[in-house]
Image (spheres, rainbow, N blue to C red):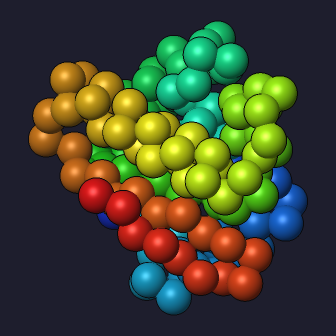
C-alpha cells in the first residue's frame, strides 16, 4: 500500500548527528512524514568517486520512495567534521576551505544528477554543525 509522505531525507550515519537531524526535522513539522536514507557522508557518499559503489543504491532507494511514498522533495543534510568528507579530501590538509569545497561539490553534483533523473523533485541542501546551526545551499 502506498502512502504520501512529505519528503525523503538523505543524511549521514554519524551517531553524533542522528539526534540533531531528528530534532531538526521534528521542528520543521516532519515527524513521521519522511522516508530516510542514511549513509556515510550523505551527499558526499552518494556523489564522490571514492564511494562510487554506493551511488546506485541511493538512486534506486530514492526512486522507490518516489513511487511508494509519493514524495516530492529530497532534504539533504550534510554535516561539519564529516569522516566521509575527510576520506574524499584524501591526504590533503582538511581545512575549512577544503571541507566547504567538498560539501558544495557534493550538492552541485547531486543537483545535476537529480535534475536529469527526477526533474520534478524539489531539493533542499543543508549543512549542519555540532552546535545545531544549519546553513542552507541552493
Quarter occupied by the N terminus: top left
Q: Nearer the viewer, residue 65 or 110?
A: 110
Closer-to-camera residue (126/73) = 126
Q: Nearer the viewer, residue 128 or 37?
A: 128
Vertical arrangement, residue 127 with respect to residue 3, above or below: below
Q: Quadrant of the C terminus?
A: bottom left
Residue ID at (53%, 76%): 134
Q: Is residue 29 left or right of residue 102?
A: left
Q: Position of residue 39 (x, y in %)?
A: 69, 39
User: Residue at horizontal 30%, vertical 52%?
Assistant: 123
Visible in this render: residue 6?
yes
Give how far across and how far down residue 81 sits, in percent.
77, 58
Residue name at image x 22 percent, y 44 percent: 121
The residue furthest left is: 120
Q: Could you say which quadrant of the image residue 53 lies in? A: top right
Residue 10 shown left or right of residue 69 in the figure: right
Position of 4 with respect to 121 (left or right) is right
Quadrant of the rendered structure where residue 109 is? top left
**Relative image position of residue 115 (x, y in whole percent):** 20, 32
Residue 38 showing in the rendered view? no
Specify the farthest residue to the top: 53
Q: Is residue 124 above or below residue 85?
A: below
Residue 96: which quarter of the image? bottom right
In the image, residue 104 sits, relative to residue 115, either above or below, namely below
* Number of residue marks: 0
Amino acid at each position: 500500500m502506498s502512502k504520501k509522505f512529505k519528503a525523503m531525507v538523505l543524511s549521514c550515519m554519524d551517531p553524533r548527528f542522528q539526534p540533531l537531524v531528528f530534532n531538526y526535522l521534528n521542528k520543521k513539522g516532519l515527524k513521521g512524514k519522511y522516508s530516510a536514507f542514511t549513509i556515510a557522508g550523505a551527499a558526499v557518499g552518494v556523489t564522490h568517486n571514492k564511494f562510487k559503489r554506493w551511488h546506485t543504491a541511493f538512486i534506486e532507494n530514492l526512486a522507490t520512495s518516489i513511487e511508494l511514498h509519493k514524495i516530492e522533495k529530497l532534504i539533504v543534510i550534510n554535516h561539519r567534521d564529516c569522516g566521509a568528507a575527510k576520506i574524499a579530501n584524501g591526504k590533503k590538509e582538511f581545512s575549512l576551505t577544503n571541507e566547504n569545497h567538498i560539501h558544495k561539490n557534493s550538492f552541485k553534483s547531486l543537483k545535476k544528477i537529480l535534475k536529469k533523473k527526477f526533474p520534478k523533485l524539489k531539493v533542499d541542501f543543508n549543512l549542519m554543525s555540532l552546535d545545531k546551526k544549519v546553513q542552507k545551499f541552493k
